[in-house]
Amino acid sequence: MDGTAFFYVGFSKNEKGKSDRALQDFNQAIKLDPADVDAFYNRGVAYADKGQSDRAKQDYTQAITLDPAYANAFYNRGACPYETSEPAQEEARVHQGITRTLNKHAPVQTPRLCCAP
């Protein structure tokens, strides 16, 4: 199986609420393709679903590093619980991602929140 297959299997598992199993597949997808921005983003979603916001933020940050216009990654990273002393900086990052997307005239998708309130 290539990285893409692991990504889709992980995505399906996470949608069914099987975050632990999804993480295994996302890890394998990233191992096979370390530049798979969607695998990092969705692994971040899986970590967030498990309440591991620090790990989620790391993956959202890596997704942003790989694709600086990935607005959903900016949004989710900023929406995670503020475990930083600089919440204004996180909010600015969210707006930065949205602005980058709008400037490229790309459609804005409704992002999936990384953490439940």
Image (cartoon, grey):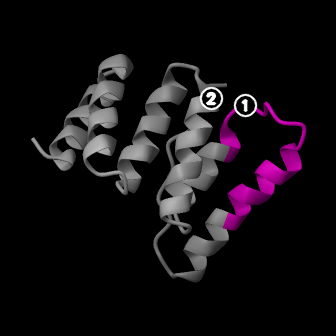
Mark seen at residue 81:
1
Could you say where residue 46 lies in the image, as x and y percent from the top left?
44, 29
- Residue type (three-letter) at the residue carrying disc 2: Ser
Above/below status of 66 relative to 47 = below
Image-based side of 58 in relation to 20, left or right: right
Which residue is nearer to you in this view: 23 or 34? Answer: 34
Q: Residue at x 55, y 58 (%)?
A: 64
For disc 1, the neighbor class at 10 Å (few under 14, some 14 to 19, many from 20) is some
Above/below status of 10 relative to 88 = above
Q: Residue at x 21, y 41 (%)?
A: 8
Instruction: Based on the picture, tell me whether residue 100 belongs to the magenta stretch.
Output: no
For disc 2, the neighbor class at 10 Å (few under 14, some 14 to 19, many from 20) is many
Give the structural element (helix, strand or loop) at label 2: helix
Image-based side of 88 in relation to 101, left or right: right
Image-based side of 114 in relation to 79, left or right: left
Disc on the earlier residue, 1 or 2: 2
Residue annotated with mark 2: 53
Could you say where residue 73 lies in the image, as x and y percent from the top left?
55, 52
Provide the residue span drawn in magenta.
78-96
Label the magenta part by its dominant secondary structure: helix
Kindly indicate whether the residue at mark 2 contacts the one at mark 1 (C-beta within 8 angstroms): yes
Q: Residue at x 27, y 35 (%)?
A: 28
Residue that extends furthest to the left in the rendered view of this protein: 1
Instruction: Based on the picture, tell me whether residue 90 belongs to the magenta stretch.
Output: yes
Mark seen at residue 108:
none
Quadrant of the frame with the C terminus? top right
